[in-house]
Structure formats: structure tokens, C-alpha cells
Image: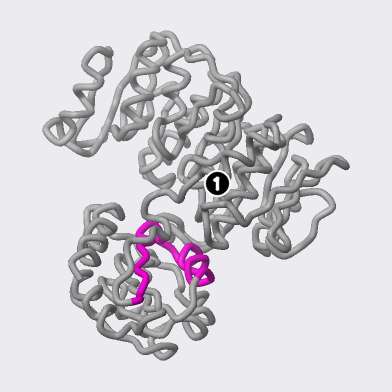
């Protein structure tokens, strides 16, 4: 891809936009960066660009920057239907995402992980497996470092593992992972997409450029994933917690079994530290990607045995008066909370936050069956009470701290207090991490 002297616009100056601008300037492109935030708000980002020759349009967007560009690189936070992107597209300007740009400069095999939930755990575990197998490995994408930083660094690697969001897939054209995994699908980001189908369509683009030489690792137990996967060109490699598979990876009677081209490997689950039904799926997906890309079974299993849960995903905080307290602040959608509820009985569930537009009805059966007390907080509390309130002893709390105290009062010994919000955190907190820390502090203060 010839970049020298090309007029290239980078839209959005978050971490991804800064890395793209730096990379493009180093390649000799005439780079313009644009962001609705002003110079004062972007001081940190601009400092990172100080050594690069870039033109800046800050505090506003100029249509001329968009329509006169040879190429536009869009940060994931910018929606596809932005009027200036629409105008540029109508003029025939090529618009791509950072992962598309990066993929044109990366030669190593790429394993890409997407899905509504479990992406970060699966991506991190897969990266650890590759490293333990002796591969020089880059792990990034939607977590850690943008893929373009690998292209910029000229680092020599054997394997690339990337967590990929639906937003990053919106502007791809040739992006092609050798192995692509779709972990699950449930309603999310309906504040960004016009409807659920648009979100699904964005996720499915991860398979768009694969060929029959590539692999699609998909969740056989998720009916929507399995239905959508039937149209892919890559070789389907399913994983399942419920079915024995002739080709694929599955878990039955405490053993994960991998079967591929007549070859079989078995991995007992009893000593695995990563607990919960959702993590069983994440482990199978990571093992499938690793083994399909040449990792050795023994080293891969060793990594799985030693791997611990990431922060803010079903993390045990402490036990008080015979009650276990778990923090699951990363559960910002219904699908994630379903997996959490499947992992416990006799639950006091603290949920709520900023509503993301999806239905809470998929939680109904699990709330009725497993949730003894439901404590609701935040903007979404009223709608959650309307959809779920009649299924359990339901109460409201003004703050997260008040919810923790209330949970301690109503939960009998042997029960579990689970903070798994099903909502984003932005109504009350800076982000899900601040929400997690506030919950942990409240529990430690009991």
C-alpha cells in the first residue's frame, strides 16, 4: 500500500488514532488529524505526536478535510453514519479502520477473537499459550496495544493475537485472520447500532475475507452463532459444553476433548483454576485457536492450568458471615450476566447502571430460578424492575455502597452476593474499573 505523499485523514485521537497518525507520518503521508476535543483536552495525545509531522483540526471537524482526503482512517469510537464520513464515501474516498490498515503491514499469522463476552479472557489466554509454546507473540487489538503499533515497531513476531470489537470491523476490506473465533452473540451496543441485526452483521465481518484454508472457531451451543456461521467460507471448527463433536472441541464429564482431522487430545478440567461455565467456553476457544495454529498440546494445557481469572470478571472479593462476595463489573450486557448467574445458586444480585437499550427479558428464567434477592441501582433500575422485579425479592438502592450494605442484611449464610450489572457504568462512575473498586471497597468495609 503506497502511503508516501498521500493525503490521509485520521478521525479521532484516542490511543488508536495517535498510533495511526504516527505510523502514517513515518511512512511519508501528508497526515491530518481531527477530533472534536480541543487542544487543552488533547494535551497528552498531542505530546505523543510532537515528533511527527501532522496537521491538526481540533475542536471541530472540517468537511474539506474529509472530502479532499485520499484515505480516511477512522477510530473505533466514530459511528459509521457520521455525516462527514457519509459525504466522503459518496465522493469515493476510501475509508478504513485501524485494524485494516495494520493488517496490510503484518505478515505473521493472525488469530482474531470477537463475540459479545469473553473476548479479553480468551485473547489473553491464547497469547499466553503461544508464548509458553515458544512463539514470539504480539497480543493487542481492542485490548492493550493497537495492531498498528506492531506494524510501526517492525518487531519480528511468529503469532499475532487480537481482540476485535464490532466497531473495529465496520470499515474493513481485506482484513483476514487465519483463525477467527466468534464466542457468542447477545444484545449489546444498541446505543450505537440501529438494531440488533446491524450489530450481528458487524461481528460477522470477522469471517468475511477468510478462505477454505482458514478456520472459523464458533460456539456450537449458541443457536444464533451456529446459524450465522453456516455461510462462512472458512473451515468450521465448533466448540461445545453440551455436545460430543466428531470435529471440534468439547467438554464432557470433566474432560475437554479436541478432535481434528482424526487426531484427538484430552485435557482434564479438575485442576483448572479458571472457573465458571463462561470460562470453560473461553478455554475451549483459546485451545482450539492455539492447536489449529501449531501449538503443542502439553505446553498449551500447562498454560491453561496456571491461568487465573482477569480482574473484574467474576472476581472473588471476600467471605463475610458465610456469604461470598463476587465482583463482575465487566458484565455490561445481558449475555455476560447470564453466564455469571449460571455459575451460582442462592444469589443476591446487584445490577443496574446506564441502560444500553437491549431487553433484560433473557435473564428472566435465571433470575426466577437462582436469584433470591435483586438489588437495583442507577438509571436502568426502573426498566429492570419492570422487566424482572416480579421474579424475585426486588429492592432499590441509591448508591452502590448502599446496595452492598442492603445485600449483607438480606443474604443468609451460604448465599452469594454478585455484582453483575448488565449495564455500562457511565451514569455513576468513570468506567467499569472504578465501579469495581467502589464495590470492593464497600465489601471490605462490611
Compared with 364, 144 (above or below) is above
Quarter of image, res 133: top right
| x and y, in percent, of residue 34 in the image | 27, 30
x and y percentages locating residue 156 in the rendered image: 53, 14
Residue at 57% x, 52% y: name it: 272
Quadrant into which the N terminus falls: top right
Please indicate whether residue 417 sits to the left or right of residue 343 in the image: left
Question: Quadrant of residue 45 in the image?
Answer: top left
Residue 356, placed above or below residue 49: below
Residue denoted by label 1 = 114
Q: Which coloring applies here?
A: one colour
Left or right placement of residue 366 versus residue 84 in this view:
right
Range of magenta residues: 322-343
Q: Measured from the top left, where is residue 149 in percent x and y?
A: 42, 23
Residue 9: image x %, image y %?
36, 25
Reply above or below: 98 against 326: above
Q: Residue at x 68, y 55 (%)?
A: 228
Query: Between residues 297 and 190, which one lies in front from this camera angle?
Result: 297
Say whether residue 37 is visible: yes
Crowdedness near tag 1: few (<14), some (14–19) or many (≥20) residues, C-alpha within 10 Å = many
> In the figure, is residue 428 to the left or right of 343?
left
* Residue 325 lies in the magenta stretch: yes
Amino acid at each position: 500500500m503506497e502511503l508516501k505523499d498521500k493525503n490521509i485523514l485520521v478521525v479521532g485521537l484516542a490511543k488508536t488514532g495517535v498510533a495511526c497518525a504516527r505510523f502514517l507520518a513515518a511512512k511519508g503521508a501528508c497526515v491530518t488529524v481531527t477530533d472534536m476535543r480541543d487542544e487543552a483536552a488533547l494535551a497528552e495525545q498531542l505530546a505523543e505526536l510532537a515528533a511527527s509531522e501532522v496537521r491538526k483540526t481540533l475542536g471541530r471537524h472540517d468537511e474539506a478535510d474529509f472530502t479532499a482526503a485520499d484515505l480516511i482512517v477512522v477510530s473505533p469510537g466514530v459511528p459509521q453514519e457520521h455525516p462527514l464520513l457519509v459525504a466522503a464515501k459518496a465522493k469515493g474516498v476510501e475509508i478504513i479502520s485501524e485494524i485494516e490498515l495494520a493488517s496490510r503491514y503484518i505478515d505473521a499469522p493472525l488469530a482474531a477473537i470477537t463475540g459479545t463476552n469473553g473476548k479479553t479472557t480468551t485473547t489473553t489466554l491464547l497469547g499466553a499459550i503461544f508464548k509458553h509454546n515458544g512463539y514470539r507473540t504480539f497480543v493487542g487489538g481492542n485490548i492493550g496495544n493497537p495492531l498498528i503499533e506492531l506494524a510501526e515497531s517492525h518487531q519480528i513476531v511468529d503469532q499475532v493475537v487480537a481482540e476485535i470489537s464490532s466497531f473495529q470491523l465496520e470499515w474493513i476490506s481485506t482484513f483476514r485472520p487465519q483463525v477467527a473465533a466468534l464466542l457468542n452473540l447477545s444484545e449489546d451496543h444498541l446505543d450505537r447500532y440501529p438494531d440488533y441485526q446491524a450489530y450481528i452483521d458487524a461481528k460477522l465481518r470477522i469471517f468475511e475475507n477468510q478462505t477454505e484454508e482458514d478456520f472459523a472457531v464458533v460456539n456450537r451451543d449458541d443457536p444464533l452463532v451456529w446459524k450465522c456461521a453456516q455461510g462462512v467460507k472458512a473451515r468450521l471448527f465448533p466448540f461445545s459444553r453440551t455436545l460430543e463433536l466428531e470435529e471440534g472441541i468439547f467438554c464432557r464429564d470433566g474432560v475437554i476433548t479436541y478432535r481434528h482431522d482424526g487426531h484427538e487430545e484430552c485435557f482434564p478440567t479438575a485442576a483448572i483454576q479458571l472457573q465458571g461455565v463462561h470460562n470453560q467456553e473461553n478455554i475451549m476457544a483459546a485451545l482450539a485457536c492455539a492447536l489449529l495454529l501449531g501449538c503443542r498440546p502439553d505446553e498449551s494445557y500447562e498454560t491453561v492450568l496456571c491461568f487465573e481469572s482477569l480482574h473484574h470478571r467474576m472476581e472473588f472479593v471476600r467471605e463475610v458471615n458465610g456469604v461470598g462476595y463476587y465482583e463482575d463489573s465487566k458484565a455490561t450486557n445481558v449475555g455476560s450476566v447470564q453466564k455469571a448467574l449460571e455459575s451460582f445458586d442462592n444469589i443476591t444480585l446487584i445490577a443496574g447502571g446506564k441502560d444500553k437499550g437491549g431487553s433484560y427479558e433473557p435473564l428472566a428464567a435465571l433470575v426466577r430460578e437462582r436469584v433470591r434477592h435483586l438489588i437495583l441501582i442507577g438509571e436502568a433500575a426502573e426498566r429492570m424492575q419492570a422487566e424482572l422485579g416480579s421474579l424475585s425479592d426486588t429492592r432499590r438502592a441509591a448508591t452502590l455502597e448502599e446496595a452492598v450494605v442492603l445485600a449483607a442484611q438480606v443474604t443468609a449464610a451460604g448465599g452469594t452476593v454478585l455484582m453483575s450489572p448488565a449495564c455500562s457504568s457511565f451514569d455513576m462512575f468513570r468506567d467499569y474499573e472504578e465501579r469495581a473498586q467502589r464495590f470492593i471497597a464497600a465489601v471490605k468495609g462490611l
